[in-house]
Image (cartoon, rainbow, N blue to C red):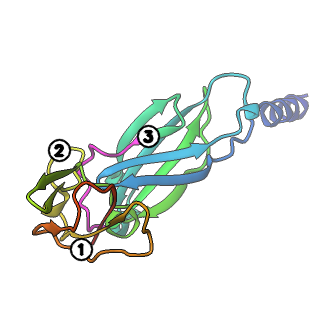
Amino acid sequence: MWVLKWCLTFIFTTTVTTVLYSPYNVTMEAVNTRYILLWDWDQTQANYTMTFTSAYTYSNNKHIEESYRTACNRTAKRQCDFSHQNLFYSASYVVRVRAEGKRESSPWFVRRFCPDEQASLGPPSRVEVRSGEAMLNIIIAEPLTVYNTSMSTILPLSYRVQYWEKHNPQRVIPDSLDGVEIGALWRPYHLLQNSFR
């Protein structure tokens, strides 16, 4: 009789326990120092709203569980903003996310993240063109971090400026940040500016 109770308990326990799958399509959207971890999750795995926890650590500490710092804890959103975690731009991290139910958790989905290698450089915070006597002055305000400081405090920046007459796109005039001398100020021009490392 005791063996029968144990078997029935074991069968009941194993049929009630469900396996949660990890989030998938996990990507880090990184521009300047704005870092948003995004993921998908199959809601059909549970008949209730799932929450998610995201954490990070330095890559060399990835096997030390206590080294992980939580960025988002039990959020219902399918994203986590790591922007204000003070991640060093040139460091290498491991970020992870898992689904959490009422009594169960999925395995962690883990990925490496290095801002210096993976973050895109965003556009300048402002581009202004001022006309003078037979000259255009182009003012470029550097891209900004999430703390509104210049990205040039983190990495060296360069710019390429090109312009051409509206009806003559084949003729791209070389760039100059000291002032652009043009032949006819009354003609419309197009301006292209790129920022890069």
* Residue 90 placement, left or right of 63: left
- Return the residue nearer the eye: 82 or 64: 82
Which of disc 2 and disc 1 is earlier in sequence?
A: 2
* Residue 61 placement, left or right of 142: right
Secondary structure state at the residue bearing disc 2 = loop
State the quadrant of the C terminus.
bottom left
Q: Main secondary structure of the magenta part?
A: loop
87 inside magenta stretch: yes
Q: Which residue is mark 2?
A: 148
Q: What is the C-alpha distance between the residues marked 1 and 3?
A: 40 Å
Q: Which residue is mark 3?
A: 80
* Residue 29 placement, left or right of 108: left
Q: Which residue is mark 1?
A: 175
Label 2–label 3 contact, CB within 8 A: no
6 inside magenta stretch: no
The three-letter amino acid code for the residue at tag 2 is Asn
The location of residue 160, given as percent across then percent down, is 27, 71
Choose top left, top right, bottom left or bottom right for residue 177.
bottom left
The three-letter amino acid code for the residue at tag 3 is Cys
User: Which residue of the protein is positioned furthest toward the top in this rendering?
Assistant: 48
Which of disc 3 and disc 2 is earlier in sequence?
A: 3
Identified at 19% across, 58% down, the residue is 151
Secondary structure state at the residue bearing disc 1 = loop
Secondary structure state at the residue bearing disc 3 = strand
Choose top left, top right, bottom left or bottom right for residue 161.
bottom left
Which of disc 3 and disc 1 is earlier in sequence?
A: 3
The location of residue 154, given as percent across then percent down, is 17, 63
The three-letter amino acid code for the residue at tag 1 is Asp
- Residue 42 lies, with reference to residue 96, above or below; the image says above
**Span colored in magenta:** 80-91
The location of residue 22, given as percent across then percent down, is 63, 47
Label 1–label 3 contact, CB within 8 A: no
